[in-house]
Amino acid sequence: MAPLDISLLPAEASADTDTMREVADLVNRVYATAENGQWLPGTTRTTVEEITELTRAGQIVVARLDGAVVGSIRVQHLDAETGESGMLVADPDHRGMGIGRRLRSFVIDMLRRQGIGTLQIELLVPRDWTQDSKEFMAGWNERSGYKVVRKGAFEEQYPDLAPRLATPCDFVIYHKAL
Ligand SMILES: CC(C)(COP(=O)(O)OP(=O)(O)OC[C@H]1O[C@@H](n2cnc3c(N)ncnc32)[C@H](O)[C@@H]1OP(=O)(O)O)[C@@H](O)C(=O)NCCC(=O)NCCS
């Protein structure tokens, strides 16, 4: 099998509309299942425009197999000490082969080189029921050395997005020392 290629998209890739659409479609397809029941019908995780903007800002890392995008993750600096990763996805047809792990370790190596000491991730979970994908993430986060540092009500942190929720949700913030 072809090796998995992980790379930070260069800012110029934002002009490559096919790739921008490929990444946005993958994120939206994966989140439609992973956050099923958490959002009102018709709500998508991202748009081609947002992925284009994030790519231009140097924040999108992709995993490719035979040239096709099979995973992605967003990375950003929150301040001089702290980085954040999010919007992590792996193609459902290629799960369990290390795409998620490789994307995360690529981001960690990149942030370490940039002098960042703490990595933050955020998990959006339904308040009153359990979502399988979130249970999986919580277990993986714990195994990977992420510690819960804060929990809160989604509507307090993101009042603009809260009206799109289909069910009350909380966010859980994790930190990992790099
Ligand atoms: C999270 C996600 C990216 C993981 O992708 P993946 O490429 O399938 O995962 P990997 O193969 O890299 O494995 C990651 C971990 O899960 C474990 N794992 C993978 N598949 C598993 C399975 N079927 N059963 C149990 N554990 C499994 C691996 O052993 C690994 O754990 P380890 O690092 O402790 O060994 C993928 O499940 C996904 O896209 N989920 C939906 C989107 C989502 O929830 N994103 C995060 C939003 S907060």
Image (spheres, grey):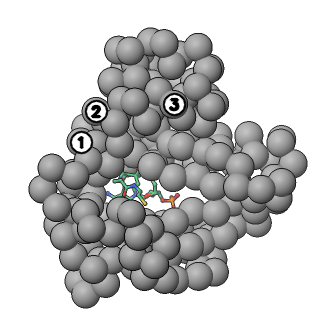
Near-viewer residue (31 or 99): 31
- Which of the two labelled residues, at mark 3 and mark 2, occupies the earlier sequence position? 2
Q: How far apart are marks 3 and 2 (CA)?
A: 15 Å
Q: Nearer the viewer, mark 3 or mark 1?
A: 3
Can you see residue 71? yes
Q: Is mark 3 on a helix, strand or loop?
A: helix
Give x and y (percent) for residue 50. 43, 36
Mark 2 sits on what residue?
Answer: 25
The amino acid pointed to by label 2 is Asp
Can you see residue 102? no
Choose top left, top right, bottom left or bottom right for residue 16: top left
- In the rendered view of the protein, which quadrant contains the C terminus? bottom right
Q: Residue at x 33, y 69 (%)?
A: 162
The amino acid pointed to by label 3 is Glu
Q: Residue at x 62, y 20 (%)?
A: 10
Disc 2 residue lies near ligand 1 with CB under 8 A: no
Q: What element carries label 1?
A: helix
Mark 1 sits on what residue?
Answer: 29
Q: How far apart are marks 2 and 1 (CA)?
A: 6 Å
| Mark 1 surroundings: few (<14), some (14-19) or many (≥20) residues within 10 A | some
Q: Residue at x 21, y 76 (%)?
A: 167
Q: Left or right: 128 with respect to 3? A: left
CB atoms at circles 2 and 1 under 8 Å apart? yes
Q: Distance between the residues labelled 3 and 1?
A: 20 Å
